[in-house]
């Protein structure tokens, strides 16, 4: 049976010729079909066109009533598998403590690691499942989830097994990332290289043996892991079949962007501190700059220089950074709004950033992120809107009517 969407006001992000991502001035460009229809078969986009559609007798038909249809969001950076919450630290931030100061007091990532260690795998799965349902309801069709709140082999594997189970038991497309190098545990503060050795010699082989991770990531920044340590970890991860990603330049000019490019990282993420040297490193690379404005908003720090990146003819993705300490939301409509209000991006630039460019940052550009026959039918149907720009403009008010994953309308 086919699912046919009729009375589509505008079909956004139609793909005339396959492209891996949008970059520079191309980020302002979006192909569209007005007064359209779209047919889905076997979970894939089958065809689409302009005007009225005459369904087959056994087709399931959904009337979009003039709403827009667009690809579901591709959120390429989250930490949504975690235990408990950290709202107590929010008060610390209000009282003036910085992210680094909270971490030095045993808060931050180390706080989440302590909570996770006390939480069973089943309970961790159930907590994460609630968040998965939340982000599906808010339009996300593909997501990357990182470990990194274990900080020991047992608990890192526990997190990654939860991510694997989420892949198996939900309709969401999920990519998994091993982030054992998220922070240095308290017991290793006097000798961080000893912890790096643990990541290299025990964690990475164990993760690879169970094939639990698509990617490997490192928090390469001031107060976390150095360029030299990052270099060692990425090299080992690549040898074990994991592709690189990087947390970089959130707190300082750390060299993380450059080491990420060196290893062909699929994305380098955060990038609040990005200058000419970093832009030059990204040019002619295959690495996607990925900005996380939710973290900048929540932490009260500077936003990444989106306009400089786009004006350098580079691509750019936006992601939620959904995590308990610095961005406790996976709402990509909000991320688009921040892209416009704080990063000074244009509406179609943010649309490209949360669809095809986010898909590329997860290695999903051939199956997600645009409306094209043969791609997975992960779609958003909006309420009727005067133009796409109304969606990020009306921040705090969702414009999503229905979400479709794998060709199935979500309840």
Image (cartoon, helix red, strand yellow):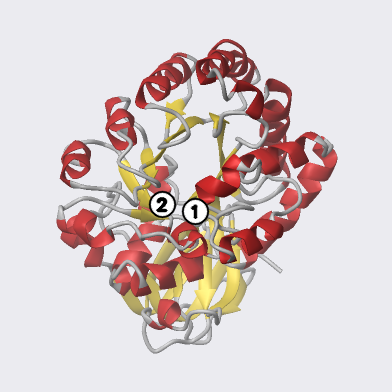
Q: Which of these two is toward me, 344 or 407?
A: 344
Residue carrying label 2:
358
Q: Is residue 160 above or below residue 290?
A: above
For the point 67% across and 65% down, which residue is it? 410
Residue 306 in the image: x percent, y percent? 28, 59
Q: Are marks 2 and 1 in contact (CB under 8 Å)?
A: yes
Give the left or right position of residue 113, taking residue 199 as reference: right
The answer to whether any part of residue 366 appears in the image is no
Q: Label 1: how many residues lie within 10 Å, few (<14), some (14-19) or many (20+)?
A: many
Residue where numbered disc 1 is placed: 75
The alpha-carbon separation of the residues under discs 2 and 1 comes to 6 Å
If the image is split into quadrants, where does the N terminus sit? bottom right
Numbered badge on residue 408: none
Instruction: Locate residue 100, reporting x and y percent.
Output: 51, 46
- Residue 45 lies, with reference to residue 250, above or below; the image says below
Question: In terms of secondary structure, where does tag 1 sit?
Answer: strand
């Amino acid at each position: 049976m086919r699912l046919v969407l009729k009375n589509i006001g505008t079909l956004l992000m139609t793909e005339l010729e396959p492209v891996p991502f949008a970059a520079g001035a191309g980020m302002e460009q979006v192909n569209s079909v007005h007064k359209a229809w779209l047919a889905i078969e076997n979970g894939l986009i089958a065809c689409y066109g302009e005007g009225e559609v005459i369904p087959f007798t056994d087709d399931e038909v959904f009337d979009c009533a003039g709403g827009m249809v667009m690809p579901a969001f591709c959120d390429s950076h989250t930490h949504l598998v975690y235990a408990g919450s950290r709202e107590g630290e929010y008060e610390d931030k209000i009282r003036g403590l910085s992210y680094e100061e909270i971490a030095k007091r045993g808060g931050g990532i180390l706080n989440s690691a302590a909570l996770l260690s006390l939480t069973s795998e089943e309970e961790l799965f159930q907590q994460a499942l609630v968040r998965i349902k939340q982000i599906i309801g808010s339009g996300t069709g593909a997501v990357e989830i990182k470990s990194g709140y274990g900080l020991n082999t047992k608990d890192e594997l526990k997190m990654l097994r939860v991510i694997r189970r989420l892949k198996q038991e939900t309709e969401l497309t999920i990519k998994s990332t091993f982030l054992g190098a998220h922070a240095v545990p308290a017991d290793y503060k006097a000798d961080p290289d000893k912890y790096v050795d643990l990541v290299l010699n025990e964690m990475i082989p164990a993760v690879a043996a169970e094939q639990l991770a698509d990617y490997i990531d490192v928090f390469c920044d001031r107060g976390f892991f150095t360029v030299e340590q990052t270099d060692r970890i990425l090299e080992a991860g690549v040898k074990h079949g994991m592709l690189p990603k990087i947390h970089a330049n959130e707190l300082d000019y750390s060299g993380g962007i450059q080491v990420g490019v060196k290893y062909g990282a699929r994305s380098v993420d955060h990038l609040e501190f990005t200058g000419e040297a970093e832009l030059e490193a990204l040019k002619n690379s295959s690495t996607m700059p990925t900005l996380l404005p939710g973290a900048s908003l929540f932490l009260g720090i500077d936003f990444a220089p989106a306009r400089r990146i786009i004006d350098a003819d580079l691509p750019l993705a936006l992601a939620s950074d959904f995590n308990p300490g610095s961005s406790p939301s996976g709402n990509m409509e909000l991320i688009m709004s921040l892209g416009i209000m704080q990063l000074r991006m244009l509406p179609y630039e943010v649309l490209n950033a949360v669809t095809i460019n986010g898909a590329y940052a997860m290695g999903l550009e051939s199956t997600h992120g645009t409306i094209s026959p043969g791609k997975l039918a992960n779609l958003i149907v909006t309420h009727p809107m005067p133009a796409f720009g109304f969606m990020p403009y009306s921040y705090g008010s969702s414009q999503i009517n229905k979400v479709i994953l794998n060709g199935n309308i979500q309840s």
